[in-house]
Image (cartoon, rainbow, N blue to C red):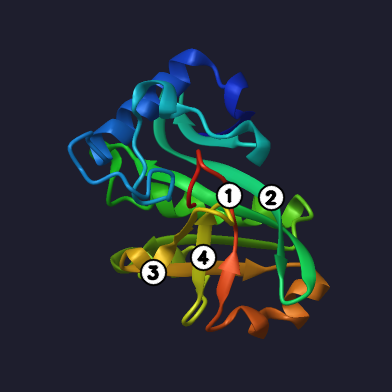
Amino acid sequence: MRIVTFRERETPPELRAQALAQQAQAWPPSVDDRANDSDSDSHSDGDGDWHDPALDPVTMLLVDGGTVIASLDLLSKDIWHHGRSYRARGLSRVVTGVTHRGRGFGRHLVAYAREEIRRSGADLGIFTCDRELQGFYESAGWQPVAGAVLVGGTPDDPFPSDLFDKVTMAAFFSPAARRHADSFTGTRIALHSGPVDRLW
């Protein structure tokens, strides 16, 4: 079993098809998809399968031979918060195949993604998850940011995470991010991830 990483559009088709099938199982088209690209709400819908290329999407897969066990995507952008610029990366579309759940595979992949974000030189990792998944992400090394609201969408059409029962999770890596980590607590964080990936 190994973890492989690809630029999203360079993912081998047979592996990508398996990841999309797992997403469709987790988030069938009938569910409310208003948070389309949040890690816990997104699902595939034809042409909407692709992330916004401006967010430099990367696909990370836990594979066993030619079988995808779990997958997630990493999205990136620069954000401006309390007078400072940060390079931020976040998790999106985190999913483990139905037959492989409950054995720690998803946790292993999410923990690996955290370390990959750290190694990439990003200032911080930040994303939202459904409240009931907070403990899962904490077990993989992420921490909740109390009272923080991640505001996706665009400045003219914002899409805040407090429209849903979400928790903002983060990890602070660079010296500047660690020094100013408290500035993220209890605030609205302007992610503005765009009209395609409205929230991650």
Question: Nearer the N terminus, badge 4 or badge 3?
Answer: 4
Question: Nearer the N terminus, badge 1 or badge 2?
Answer: 2
| Category of crowding for the residue at label 4, using alpha-carbon neighbours closer than 10 angstroms: few (below 14), some (14–19), many (at least 20) | many
The amino acid type of the residue labelled 3 equals: Asp
Marks 2/4: CA distance?
A: 13 Å
Marks 3/2: CA distance?
A: 21 Å
Q: Circle 3 sits on which residue?
A: 162
Is residue 66 visible to us here?
no
The amino acid type of the residue labelled 1 equals: Ser
Is residue 121 visible to us here?
yes
Question: Nearer the N terminus, badge 3 or badge 2?
Answer: 2
Question: Nearer the N terminus, badge 2 or badge 4?
Answer: 2
Of the two numbered discs 1 and 2 in the rendering, the one whose residue sits closer to the viewer: 1
Q: Contact (CB < 8 A) between labels 4 and 3?
A: no
**Left or right side of 83 for 81:** left
User: Which element type, helix, strand or loop, lies under badge 3?
Assistant: helix
- Near-viewer residue (141 or 181): 181
- Near-viewer residue (88 or 5): 88
Q: Circle 2 sits on which residue?
A: 77
Q: Position of residue 181 (x, y in %)?
A: 67, 79
Please tell me which residue is depicted at 66% across the width and 82% down the height of the picture. Answer: 183
Q: Contact (CB < 8 A) between labels 1 and 2?
A: yes
The amino acid type of the residue labelled 2 equals: Lys
- Near-viewer residue (66 or 18): 18
Q: Circle 4 sits on which residue?
A: 150
Q: Position of residue 200 (x, y in %)?
A: 49, 52
User: Which element type, helix, strand or loop, lies under badge 1?
Assistant: loop
User: Which element type, helix, strand or loop, lies under badge 4?
Assistant: strand
